[in-house]
Amino acid sequence: MFVDRAKIYLKGGDGGNGVVSFRREKYVPFGGPDGGDGGRGGDVIFQVDPNLRTLLDFRYQQHIRAQRGEHGKGSNKHGRSAKDTIVRVPPGTQIREAETNLLLADLTEPGQTFVGARGGRGGRGNARFASAKEKAPRYAEKGEPGEEKWVWLELKVIADVGLVGFPNAGKSTFLSRVTAARPKIADYPFTTLAPNLGVVDMDGVEPFVIADIPGLIEGAHAGVGLGHDFLRHIERTRLLIHIIDAAGVDGRSPLEDYRQINEELTLYDERLSKLPQIVVANKADLPQAEKGIKELRQALGEENVCVISAVTGSGVKQVLYKAAEMLAQLPPAELPEKPVVLTPAEEEDKTIDITRENDIFIIRGKQIEKFVAMTDFDNEEAVKRFQRLFRLWGHEDALKAAGAKNGDTVIIGEFEFVFQTEEDE
């Protein structure tokens, strides 16, 4: 089963918790803190596997979570970091953020990797907080939560040449004759429901990959039929072979078919309409094809229309040699959209956003939400540290400026507390 789109949930592993521990040995009454750090959580990493051709596995595994790091131990023993979770995807997979539709990665090369969700760092043990002023800290950090998000995976077939044309024009028959691919072939529209790939390997030319894109219909650019699912797969091609039913077996006009397919390509993506095309009049073995071939040559020029019969093989090799010659002169395909690269500064954004709902103030911000998640609020000393840094970072003043008064409720992530200024404590 061919699946080329899937929505999945990613969760990086949580970091292990730091530990509160003190050295306790005979004759060492004040050994000091020796709590170790927690281990780092595992990342969720996408990796291109050239042996895969579909996203079918993600229909059955929609949630992917990496393991969390081990907790720290006494005697300054750090927890072990978790192993990364490797997620294998086929070449041509794009990863988009589900909420914003931003393109995060475009994976095309075998072995190429992308970190989809980072694991959280391990929390620091109390040994890390010892100082000249505080020689015996009785608090430690909890592990940082792993990154979590929903993403869309989209597969775009990677081929040098794309076969386009109306359903039943003979694209699958053409592909089966020129490559080792064996697509399903029958005399009715939409026999092909998924792209088929084949490699053309002939004497005297560089091998190239050709894809049979399922037949288009009017309105495909707007998603009519399976339009978007089909058109996506020709975005990476460098050359189009436009197969036309010259015999008009289904009662259509060959010239009108040519114009309509090109209009659909233009409306979906103007760049596709500018790709070089080899126009191929197929089904020349049928008597009624003569009229359609004459019509196409009059409109497009005799030298611009190749005449073939995919069934008998007549004229097919000439089309392939022409395609190989054109590919040798064409530059590599350029991606219409580049992935978004997140810089460390963006990932560690320290700004906060305060919204008010009656007497409830909600604070959002990457740094403060992470700090809340890593604070052990069951530990009195850890709570005091949180209050101290909350004021130091200016968040208390920001709440006052937003109108917060003593007794109002403040929510940060999953933590809720009552606002109280320092002078009123």
Image (tube, rainbow, N blue to C red):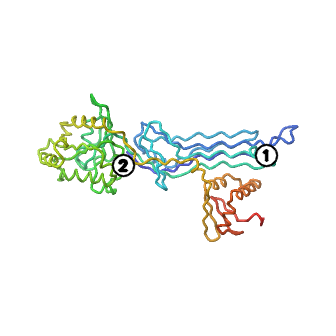
Q: Residue drawn at (59%, 44%), measured in percent from left and top?
A: 67
Image height check: is 333 above or below 148? above
Please state which of the two labelled residues, at mark 2 or mark 1, is closer to the viewer. Answer: 1
Q: 41 or 186, which is in the foreground?
A: 41
Image height check: is 112 above or below 226? above
Q: Quadrant of the N terminus?
A: top left
Q: 221 or 239, which is in the foreground?
A: 239
Q: Secondary structure at mark 1?
A: loop
Q: 398 or 29, which is in the foreground?
A: 398
In x, y percent, where is residue 106?
Answer: 45, 44
Q: Is residue 30 left or right of residue 307?
A: right
Residue type of the residue flagged with mark 2: Arg
Q: Identify the residue position indicated by label 2 in the image.
A: 232
Q: Is residue 1 visible?
A: no
Mark 2 or 1, nearer chain start = 1
Q: Identify the residue position indicated by label 1 in the image.
A: 131
Disc 2 + disc 1, Cβ < 8 Å:
no
In x, y percent, where is residue 344?
Answer: 58, 47
Q: Residue drawn at (52%, 46%), measured in percent from left and top?
A: 116
Picture quadrant of residue 24: top right
